[in-house]
Image (tube, rainbow, N blue to C red):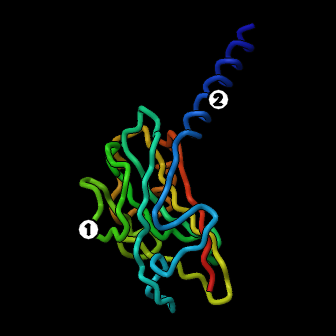
Amino acid sequence: MLKSLVLATAIASLSGFAAQAADFTLSSADIRDGGTLSDAQVANTFGCDGGNISPQLSWSNAPADTKSFVVSAYDPDAPTGSGFWHWVMFNVPASVTRLEGGVTPNKGAPDGAVQSRADAGFASYLGACPPAGETHRYIFTVTALSVDKLDLDQNASGALIGFMTNANALAKAAITVTYGR
């Protein structure tokens, strides 16, 4: 009887989390789920000549107990063996629900937020630039966290931030786009 009660409680808890997570949404004026990146969001280095502008992002219906957010852009298809983190911003205050396009190290990041060097080597957005002849997926994600901040700095790797993010995640919302050249 006790096992059944514990199992029923666990299932109800997971169902609530799934329902809560399903309500959390991410949208953008610049990108759409299943779409293709425009030249504005393409890198202006590594043989690409795009605008290297981070897209506008808006999110809504985060869990009520959200204390901060992490925003990321990740290419799981990069020929690195571990993907490529194009952008990671963490410690975004829970009061923030929107980023304008064109966030740079000196403009557009919310107070208190930290942009990591991630895999690009500098603390800012790096647009898409897959090898010639390839099309890659780019996953823009906002993750609601149960903690006020991750105790990391701008030198933290995308993998370390990802580990800490997943350890404290309440819900995730994502937009997946492609780009090829």
x then y, percent, for residue 35: 61, 68
Residue 178 visible to the viewer: yes
> From the viewer's perspective, is residue 138 above or below residue 172?
below
Give the labeled residue for mark 2: 15
Indicate which disc residue 70 carries.
none
- Residue type at the position of mark 1: Lys
- Local packing at callout 1 (Cα closer than 10 Å; few below 14, some 14-19, many 20+) is few
For mark 2, give the secondary structure.
helix
Residue 81 visible to the viewer: no
Q: Which badge, 2 or 1, comes first in the chain's sequence? A: 2
- In terms of depth relative to the viewer, which is nearer, 28 or 18? 28
- Residue type at the position of mark 2: Ser
The quadrant holding residue 58 is bottom left
Quote the CA–CA distance across marks 2 and 1. 40 Å
Give the labeled residue for mark 1: 107
x then y, percent, for residue 40: 45, 78
- In terms of depth relative to the viewer, which is nearer, 86 or 44? 44
Q: Residue at x 64, y 78 (%)?
A: 79
Q: Quadrant of the N terminus?
A: top right
For mark 1, give the secondary structure.
loop
> From the viewer's perspective, is residue 80 above or below residue 170?
below
x then y, percent, for residue 57: 43, 59
Q: Count the labels in the image.
A: 2
In the displayed image of the protein, which residue is found farthest to the bottom?
47
Q: Residue at x 55, y 71 (%)?
A: 84
